[in-house]
């Protein structure tokens, strides 16, 4: 069904292609050639590693607490057992909360990614939009998004022009 739909779209585009201009870009290639993107990714990786180590340290502490509890449990009263179990559960809960704080849907990593990466993506989008307006392209396709372009002639690849507009290529 998808193939039939895609074929119809290609057929309709082919009919209209004589009056309209099309081009494609490779956003992966563009991003790899933007130094700010690489720097932002490095910052994100460093923050992620730091937070992951912090969480792993807490889980390691939980594991140690549990092993100690198992060893000592025969000598503890029921009251002390319950207290130790609650300490272990609370420590594990704090680790999960920290994990959500850093890596959850509304977490610090997502916020940091938004702050560092989104401006770069917006610059690329604006450069593409400007190219569309300047050259009267009907559409710009992204090779990186996959599946949309079956064949593309490299002479229509405008990725280097976008890099030039962004000031990263001569």
Image (spheres, rainbow, N blue to C red):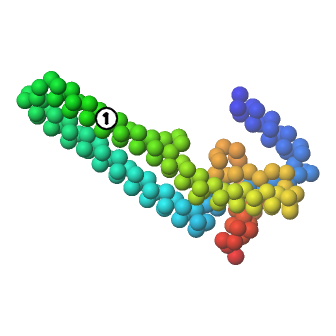
Q: Does residue 6 appear to the left or right of 145 in the view shown?
A: right
- Residue beneath the point at 55% across and 53% down: 113
- Residue beneath the point at 74% across and 68% down: 165
Q: Is residue 154 among what the camera can see?
A: no
- Residue beneath the point at 54% across and 42% down: 106
The residue that disc 1 covers is 90
Using the image as rendered, state which of residue 130 and residue 49 is in the foreground: 49
Using the image as rendered, state which of residue 131 and residue 20 is in the foreground: 131
Q: Quadrant of residue 35?
A: bottom right
Task: Return the residue found at the far right.
Answer: 19
Q: Quadrant of residue 154?
A: bottom right
22 up-or-down from 75: above or below: below
Task: Return the residue found at the far bottom.
Answer: 170
138 up-or-down from 105: above or below: below
136 up-or-down from 94: above or below: below
Q: Position of residue 13 (x, y in %)?
A: 84, 43
- Residue beneath the point at 82% across and 57% down: 132
Q: Position of residue 11 (x, y in %)?
A: 83, 39
Using the image as rendered, state which of residue 48 and residue 148 is in the foreground: 48
Q: Position of residue 137 (x, y in %)?
A: 84, 55
| Mark 1 residue element | helix
Q: Quadrant of residue 153?
A: bottom right
Q: Does residue 31 appear to the left or right of 44 in the view shown?
A: right
Task: Return the residue found at the far front.
Answer: 79
Q: Is residue 107 among what the camera can see?
A: yes
């Amino acid at each position: 069904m998808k193939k039939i739909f895609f074929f119809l779209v290609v057929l309709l585009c082919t009919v209209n292609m004589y009056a309209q201009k099309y081009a494609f870009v490779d956003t992966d290639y563009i991003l790899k050639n933007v130094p700010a993107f690489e720097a932002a990714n490095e910052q994100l990786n460093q923050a992620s590693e730091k937070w992951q180590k912090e969480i792993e340290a807490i889980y390691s502490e939980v594991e140690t607490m549990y092993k100690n509890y198992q060893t000592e449990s025969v000598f503890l009263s029921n009251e002390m057992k319950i207290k130790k179990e609650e300490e272990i559960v609370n420590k594990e809960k704090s680790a999960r909360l920290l994990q959500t704080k850093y890596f959850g849907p509304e977490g610090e990593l997502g916020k940091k990614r938004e702050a560092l990466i989104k401006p770069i993506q917006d610059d690329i989008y604006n450069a593409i939009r400007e190219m569309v307006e300047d050259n009267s392209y009907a559409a710009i396709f992204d090779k990186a998004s996959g599946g949309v372009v079956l064949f593309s002639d490299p002479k229509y690849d405008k990725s280097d022009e976008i890099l030039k507009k962004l000031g990263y290529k001569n």
